[in-house]
Image (cartoon, grey):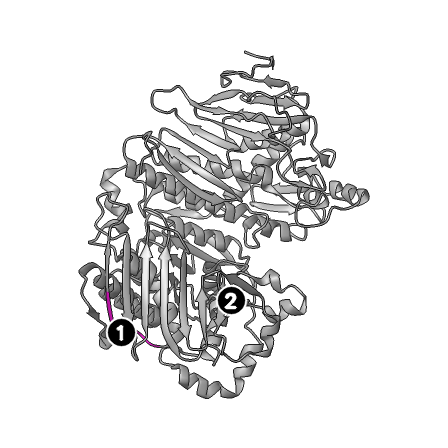
Amino acid sequence: MSTDNIGRRTFLGHAAGAVAGLSLVPEALPRPLRVTGAPLPVGVIGVGRQGRRILTELQRMDAVRVAAVCDTDRARLDAGLRRTQGAQGFDDHRAMLEKGGVEAVFVATPTHLHREIVEQAVEAERHVYCEAPLASTIEDAAAIGRAARASRKVFRAGLEGRSNPIYQLARTFFLSDAVRDLISMRAQFHQKTSWRIPVRDPEREREFNWKLDGGISIGLPGEEGTHQFDVFHWYTGRYPESIRGGGSIRLWDDGRDVFDTVACELLWPGGARLVYEATLCNSFQGRHEVLHGSNAAIKLAWNAGWMFKEADAPTQGWEVYANRQQFHNDEGITLIADATQLAAQGRLQDGVGLPNSPLYYAVEEFLKGIVEGGEITAGAGDAYRSTVIGILANRAAVTGETVKVDEAVLRG
Amino acid sequence: MKTASGFVRLALHAMATRFEAVLAGGDEALLRAAGEEALAEIEEQERRLSAFRPDSLLRRINDHAACRSVGTDSEMMGFLVRCRELWRQTGGAFDPTVGPLMRAHGFRGCAPVRNGDAEAARARTGMHLVAIDQARAEVRFLVPGVELDPGAVGKGWAIDRAAEVLRRSGVECALLHGGSSTAVAIGAPPGEDGWRVRIAAGRRGAHSDAPDGPVVRLRDQALSVSAPHGRSAGGAGHVLDPRTGRPAQGAAVAAAVCDRATDADAWSTALLALGGPPEHAPDGLTAIVRTASGDWRAAGPVAPILDRPMQTMSIQGAL
């Protein structure tokens, strides 16, 4: 089902007869990727931390074989190769596309380098998984979108919310009457880290610490916010009309010119606001998103999710058996994927939290798209639009000015 | 930011304990970045090696290797091969297949089992039951019920990987430890000839008049300390002797100094089971044991040992 234009009330209209069904039968965990024939040979381009995490997840999938790894840094390339079973190593992605024997590639390089690699991978007729944000400029993001649309192969962006089973489950509640009218939204990214990469060679400082360079980086709103903004776009089917924000360097005063702490306010059509806060200076409550409705609030924290019902909200029968967690004065119903099956086995508590990382589900969905023709939930269009919002949010934070979101730009 | 003493200090909670990196050198921002990269590596190693996480690579081996050969990556192969070598060196006193025994004794959320079932668990213990095909990078268990449990060596392995990150980043002076029980020292603090670490004498109150343990000086070496008085189940300590299937006895505290934290971690656990320094220790191992009677004994190169306890400390095979 395309989520680009659907509105909540339209969905309610179509699903009116099924609302009770939605609340009684939570989504099941996705069926694992089937092994059919020889493993699919894939390559990973860019094996910094995220690339190596992708390699570890791929190692858990029998239907896939990592045939090649690419990085321009020798130490990183060696670290990446250790996370494979004898893959070939390349320091140039073009050589890998030509000689690596891969049918699909994962692009996990710095954001501003995605465009060239994606375009060449598409030209080489490879399936492409491109980490999000797609690019650091709207122009580059649009070019990636065009390449993806022109490709006859599978393209998936590295947006991990849409394939997350808990987020999918929570969305069914959001779209039903359980949450009802959207009042406001909130999200945060909190992690105490300098974002700096240790670099011994001063000549390579800019290459490795691109995130700290205001001329290249799209900062916290772009690099982290894009993923979180996409969740709200997906849930509401809408995009903000305007964004305002600000930021500063609160802790890491080490010569960088990218804010380590930002706050943005994104205004949705109809008046709902998303208040977004991100900092590299404190880890309290990590990364999460909240949607406040007139009947309930939903809190999503990537490996877990909860619904907090208002006292006057109608009660559904299944809630009697629901797993709950107490947060100070609020009691949340734990959103558990596969709850029905687990409850039947008396193992509902076992299901709290995801058994796999959100990255795993995103990677698996991409591979299912290739091997089984499965649906891709984070395509180029959605990723382009969320990337644009991330870029504009950073612009708002950096300039301190209100940025209007041009619908024509969102259409691409 | 630097502490008052001029060190950069970072910490992380992982593997149910607290890891800390203390670094010294010129560029504070570079040290901080290197420390973060090192701690991120520890987090990644937990994701890979945890026997408790359903999505770890180790769990995948445990879940499937009894039914078929399980492919894994070069780094995991390196971990398993090193574990096998340490199992051989310690004569089985360290054994990463101790999972069934841990369950049998109630350390995995299960109730302790009867003696007969504990014997059955011991029959499923032993690295000789794990077939490692390095050429194909595959692992297979030779009998059902074998279970890898890296608890005795996982911290050390993670610290070694993190130390590699620090060295690659150009760090020349650092102390990295996990839970104050396993540490690796890179270089020495400014003006010193090594990092000085005191080995605790044992559980407070057990020997209330016992003096502190020896101080060791570490420079580009690792230290691990084990004691049976941590977690317990059914009144028994959490360190089991894989050779007998019973809780390790005979030593109150055991410490090992080696070139690598992985080795030190494994040997400190093995020394508890052995009850004292081994008869034939590998080169480079300094074994330090406090016996049940309170005496300290050491064997191997004793250069790392600085201050010895007030009681007589006997040395075996001192250079």
Task: Tell me which amino acid carries mark 2.
Answer: Gly
Residue that mark 2 sits on = A332
Is the Cβ of the residue at disc 2 closer than 8 Å to that at disc 1?
no
Question: In screen coordinates, is B235 left or right of A139?
Answer: right
Q: Is residue B137 magenta?
A: no
Quadrant holding the C terminus of chain A = bottom left
Q: Tag 1, which secondary structure? A: helix
Q: Residue at x 76, y 43 (%)?
A: B118
Quadrant holding the N terminus of chain A = bottom left
- The residue nearer to you, when weighing A332 against A115, is A332
Neighbours of disc 2 within 10 Å: few (<14), some (14-19), many (20+): many
Residue that mark 1 sits on = A410
Task: Say if residue B112 shows up in the picture.
Answer: yes
In x, y percent, where is residue A382?
35, 71
Q: Is residue A20 above or below residue B98?
A: below
Q: Nearer the viewer, mark 2 or mark 1?
A: 2
Q: Is residue B121 above or below residue A155?
A: above
Q: Tag 2, which secondary structure? A: strand
Q: Residue at x 51, y 66 (%)?
A: A332
